[in-house]
Amino acid sequence: MHGAGLDFPRMGDSSERRPILVLQHAGSEPPGVYEDELLHRRVAFARVVLDEDEELPDWRAYAGIVAMGGAMSVYDEAEHPWLVGEKRLIAEAVGADVPYWGVCLGAQLLAASLGARVSRGAQAELGVLPVQLTAAAAEDPVFAGLPASFQTLQWHSETYELPPGAVQLARSSSYEQQAFVVGRAYALQFHLEVDSALAGEWMGVSEFVDELQQLHGEGAPAALLAQVGAAEHESVRLARELFSRWLLDVVGLQETPA
């Protein structure tokens, strides 16, 4: 387990002082801009990299949970046995009203952990593409005030049904489900957290490059980097704004930026 930020307090301290738990499913898929915001605000966090066989901790020690993306499906339990324990952790923590922020696979894991079906979409959604907010997003403490539509990186071929009690926050032309909230748990299918630096690292991962080229042709990696670069001024600002609202208004953290 890896950590950064402030010293970890003892269990039993107020949620404002406990660290954030980051569930990272692959070394190449960190929280990106969201991690930048944690560091900027000097928020303590502990990172568990699940595909490196790091053990899941007791979720009760944390003020909130951030679950990132990954190439696996939520149902790939035979190949990735830790998915069983992770889904149990998410269900227990969210059931106990622990704030949650799930991205891509992390969004699908939230849906599955709460009893909703995750399935393959009609086609992969891969590229910098528009997302539209729902009317309900205008009433949400995290999403309120955002543009009605914005450009963001998409990289997925699966989708989810809304779990019981969830409120849909965003959709796209290809995938009806792009974001939802249930209680203090948020799910985002899209990758606002990926800036040019992280996208460049992804283009060094052969599996990512192969997937891109199979879907969009040989020039796809360079085209994607250009798309991310063109959109990142807005996407980075939106990522930090959204995640800050979740940290301050949902988790209740009050750390002063460094």
Image (spheres, grey):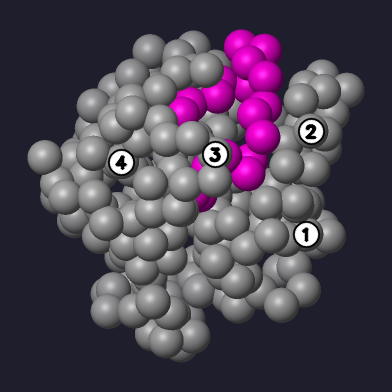
Task: Say which label, 3 or 2, has the lower sequence index.
Answer: 3
Q: Are marks 1 and 2 in contact (CB under 8 Å)?
A: no
SS for callout 4: loop
Circles 4 and 1 in contact, beta carbons < 8 Å: no
Task: Please tell me whether mark 3 sits on a helix, a strand or a loop.
Answer: loop
Chain part drawn in magenta: 46-68
Closest to the camera, between mark 3 and mark 2, is: 3
Label at residue 43: 4
Q: Position of residue 70 (x, y in %)?
A: 59, 31
Identify the amino acid type marked 2: Gly
Marks 4 & 2, CB-CB < 8 Å contact: no
Q: Is residue 238 visible?
A: no
Please state which of the two labelled residues, at mark 3 or mark 1, is closer to the viewer.
3
Circle 2: is it few (<14), some (14-19), or many (20+) Cα within 10 Å?
A: few
State the residue position of label 1: 114
Does residue 84 sit above or below 183 in this rendering? above
